Image (cartoon, grey):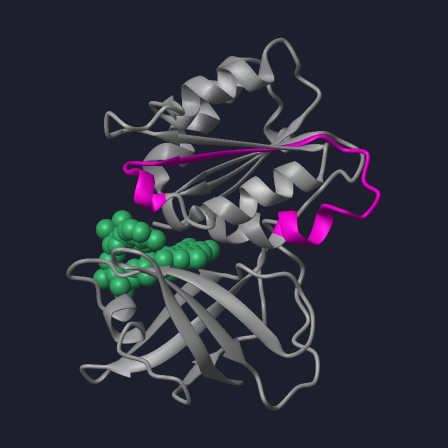
Amino acid sequence: MKAVLVEWRELAPNVRHFVFEVPEVRDFYFVPGQFVSMTHTIGGKEIVRPYSIASKPGGNRFELCLNEVDDGIFSPWLFTLKPGDEVETTAPLGYFILRNPQRDAVFVATGTGIAPMRSMLQSWLGQDDPRQLTLIFGVRYEHGLLYGSEFEELAKKHSNFTYIPTISRPEPSWTGRTGHVQEHLKEVVGDRRDMDIYICGLKAMVDDVRAMLKGMGFDRKQIIYEKYD
Ligand SMILES: Cc1cc2nc3c(=O)[nH]c(=O)nc-3n(C[C@H](O)[C@H](O)[C@H](O)COP(=O)(O)OP(=O)(O)OC[C@H]3O[C@@H](n4cnc5c(N)ncnc54)[C@H](O)[C@@H]3O)c2cc1C
């Protein structure tokens, strides 16, 4: 199907929030956490790339959070799109979705790995949900804390949600947490082994966090992950 770009805004250097519409359907149905695969012919070759949906379901729109990869093929092309331009896309796909409705969960994201977490949190918070949900979001620089004020607002509004941003290369003015997501995850989990952990980002981080959790005694069914590369 065709997705039409409605608007975009810059979230950080080389990171944009895109709003797309699918005119041929009334409801673009997806489960929070799923992705769409987009296709375009670039340099005579058909290129396909998946992108996690960053918004909650509703109507025929969906939102993406995209990083422009230096020397990449598809993402620089997406960054040339103007409102009204079209992209060929699949229906939503994927199994990176909330599993055990009763279990407390920790979301671990780095960079644009925040996209599916935003969709899940926007959808699940405020549904009279007794689960304790914690988001640990790691980025290099403070300006990379995508949707930071939104998550702060959600944490103020919902007593069952905790937002933990961490910066690995902080400016002296940053007074929050520093370092990588791993060390903060250890602290959040403590002695508990009854939570599910959702991880999204680049392979190196995802693999490292998975290995750490397995070493701590987590069952692999409790570790739900999406790798971007
Ligand atoms: C299930 C899934 C969901 C994804 N969701 C998103 C998303 O919501 N937002 C998004 O920006 N990307 C997402 N990606 C990555 C995306 O599909 C592309 O890999 C990315 O846009 C690079 O494509 P490219 O053709 O520009 O670069 P390529 O020429 O394919 O170069 C790939 C290089 O880009 C790096 N890379 C891939 N993704 C990123 C990234 N997000 N940030 C920094 N470096 C990256 C890889 O490590 C690799 O070195 C997702 C990938 C998967 C598998």
Outermost residue to the front: 173
In this picture, is 22 found above or below 188? below
Task: Specify the quadrant of the image occupied by residue 80.
Answer: bottom left
Q: Is residue 208 left or right of residue 70?
A: right
Query: Which residues, given as a range, are shown in magenta?
Result: 120-144
Task: Specify the quadrant of the image occupied by residue 134.
Answer: top right
Outermost residue to the left: 71
Q: Nearer the viewer, residue 48 or 173?
A: 173
In this picture, is 69 found above or below 128? below
Query: How many callouts does the rendering have?
Result: 0
Residue at image point 53% right, 62% down: 53
Location of residue 131 in the rendering, given as x and y in whole percent from the top left corner: 76, 33
Task: Specify the quadrant of the image occupied by residue 7.
Answer: bottom left
Is 123 one of the magenta-colored residues?
A: yes
Q: Is residue 3 left or right of residue 171?
A: right
Residue at image point 55% right, 81% down: 21
Outermost residue to the right: 128
Location of residue 33 in the rendering, given as x and y in whole percent from the top left corner: 59, 53
Location of residue 211 in the rendering, given as x and y in whole percent from the top left corner: 44, 23
